[in-house]
Amino acid sequence: MRGLKEGDIVWYTNKGGHVVAGEIKATIDGASLVQDYITNEVTEITNDLLTLQECITVEDKVNHPNHYTSGAIEVIDYIKDQLTPEEFRGAMKFNIIKYVSREKHKNGDEDLEKAQFYLNFLLGDDPRGK
């Protein structure tokens, strides 16, 4: 199976029809025994295994469209590449207002931390250390 070996991390469809991550425990005669990371169940898989890299490169047109990763990898980098500096500042202000406004109704301090993330960007300090 494309050179997959014991210890490789793969994604596959389990018996319940869900795509899950697991680790190859053995490969025998073209089949792999894969241990599900959540249930620890070991399943024999003969096809449809994807490595993490293959999963990343399969286009997800809703959550990760290829046009978001054709330049910079992270969406915020894509947005910054596509907008004028003034428009980007507006986008950062929008996110700050959004997260501050909803913090008491949704995620509390987590939303305030997200607002701080965008405030740092607005101030010219990339919080990711880039």
Image: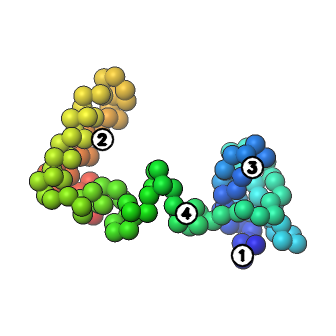
Q: Label 2 belongs to which residue?
A: 114
* Residue at the (81%, 54%) spot, across then down: 43
Distance in Å between CA atoms under marks 4 and 3: 19 Å
The residue pinned by badge 3 equals: 14
Q: Which of marks 2 and 4 is in front?
A: 4
Query: Disc 1 residue type?
Result: Arg
Q: What element carries label 3?
A: loop
Find numbered disc 2 in the image and state the secondary structure of the residue it sits on: helix
Looking at numbered disc 2 in the image, what kind of residue is underneath it? Lys
In the picture shown, does residue 48 fall above or below 127?
below
Which of the two residues, 8 or 68, is positioned nearer the viewer here?
68
Numbered marks: total: 4
Task: Give yes or no for contact between labels 2 and 4 (Cβ–Cβ under 8 Å).
Answer: no
Image spot of residue 87 (x, y percent): 15, 52
Q: Measure the C-alpha gap from mark 2 to mark 3.
A: 35 Å
- At label 2, counting other C-alpha atoms closer than 10 Å, the crowd grade (few under 14, some 14-19, many 20 or more) is some
Q: For residue 2, which numbered disc appears in the image? A: 1
What residue is shown with label 4? 58
The crowding category of the residue bearing disc 1, from other C-alpha atoms within 10 Å (few below 14, some 14 to 19, many at least 20), is few
Measure the C-alpha gap from mark 2 to mark 1.
41 Å
The residue most toward the bottom is 3
Mark 3 Cα shell of 10 Å, populated few (<14), some (14-19), many (≥20): some
Spatial CA span between label 1 and label 4 = 17 Å
